[in-house]
Image (cartoon, rainbow, N blue to C red):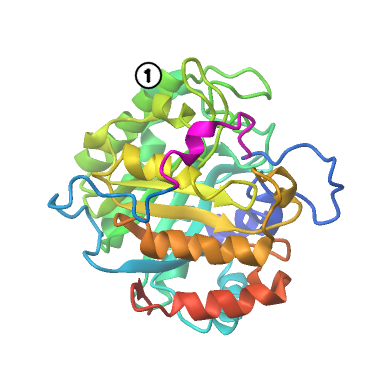
Amino acid sequence: MKNLSARLGSLLAVSLVALSLCPGIIAADAPPAAPKPFDHGDDPNVELFQYKDKKVVPDSNVQRPLAKLELKDKIYHGVLLNTDTQALFDARYKQYVEVAGAKPSMIGCFASRWSVGTEIPAESLRHRLKVIDSIPNVVPFIKLYTGDWKPGGPFMKADDILAGKEDAYFIELAEISRDFKKPFLFSINHEMNGDWFFFSELYKGQPTDWTAEKYKEVWRRIHRIFREHGATNVAFAWCPGAMGRKFGKYDATNGYKAYYPGDEYVDWVGASFYNDVNHYALDNLAMTYPNKPIVLAEWGTEPPRGAWYLPKPYPGDAEHMRRTFDFCLHRYPNMKAITYFYWGKDVDIERVPEQVEIYRREIVNPKFLNN
């Protein structure tokens, strides 16, 4: 923590601005004909409904050992909050707890190598962990971009990472993680199965050297660095979008399979899931990785995503939220954490008054671990 405030002062002023941080956010006044949300799958597939008649998607390996941080009979009640400053975090945490009526046991945030072109030092991870740790008895969930969160910004080249040119940065992250001592979830380059982030082989922005194969190799290299430097308190969460894009032999519901680093390098499997995606898309993920605990790594409702929901008609935001809780609580035995994307007015629960009652009622279900 030596000279942390001085080192971060100017950098943390460059906020990972609320709704801009997640490129999936669409402005509230966007017309129905606006481009599809970033993380909307453009390949509707009848196979999406292959498990529709089953009340429970089975965990085929019920007797497996629990993963790091996994609870046997509980689901972490989680939320994603902005940790740029302690004051901003405190205000948003207070607001969330007032709306939810319960305190979370997991708190996530985003971290990036650059923010709007400004380089962010590895030391900022220590700041974010400290901010989250200001709330007793919560598990942090750090979601790292190895580039700028803003599309079109700078990013680490896959070949540079694989050649060891960025090792110093990742070693510092590992040492900070180790020194934190407490266990936490750590994700690298989420939603890789879309075309909106530079680390996707299908990226539609400026040219990059990232491919699905390099993505897997980069993940494994970072994983090894963390282990070699004693960060054994970190559980690695691999977090694709619930729907992505067609990729080679894979349709949009299965494109994530090309990026999976392997069981040895993944502790948890996550998913970004919003109200443009039918709930049965989660079946595919749960059935593909029954030997891993699942975290609903980002979820929520926001306008105008319902315009792309299939099959039509869209059931409405409040009903989509109710179904999300129903599926997570009753359908997936290996669903072990959910983290609501509480990041600003377009995704805040209270945006739709009917959602507040649903959220408050469901989040106190005994299956959830509240703080």
Can I make out residue 82 in this image?
no
Q: Relative to residue 96, is residue 116 depicted above or below?
A: above
Secondary structure of the residue carrying numbered label 1: loop
The answer to whether one can see residue 272 in this image is yes
Please provide percent x and percent y for residue 244. 55, 33
Which is nearer the eye, 138 or 70? 70
- Find residue 317 and report its image quarter: bottom right
Would residue 46 be counted in the magenta stretch? Answer: yes
Circle 1 residues within 10 Å: few <14, some 14–19, many ≥20: few
Residue at image position (70%, 55%) is 19
| Residue 98 magenta | no
In the displayed structure image, the side of residue 352 where residue 246 appears, left or right: left
Q: As displayed, is residue 255 above or below residue 364?
A: above
Choose between 344 and 246: the one closer to the eye: 246
Span colored in magenta: 40-52
Residue drawn at x 20%, y 47% is 230
Provide the major secondary structure of the magenta segment. loop
- Amino acid type shown at disc 1: Ala
The reply, left or right, for residue 265 in relation to residue 112 is left
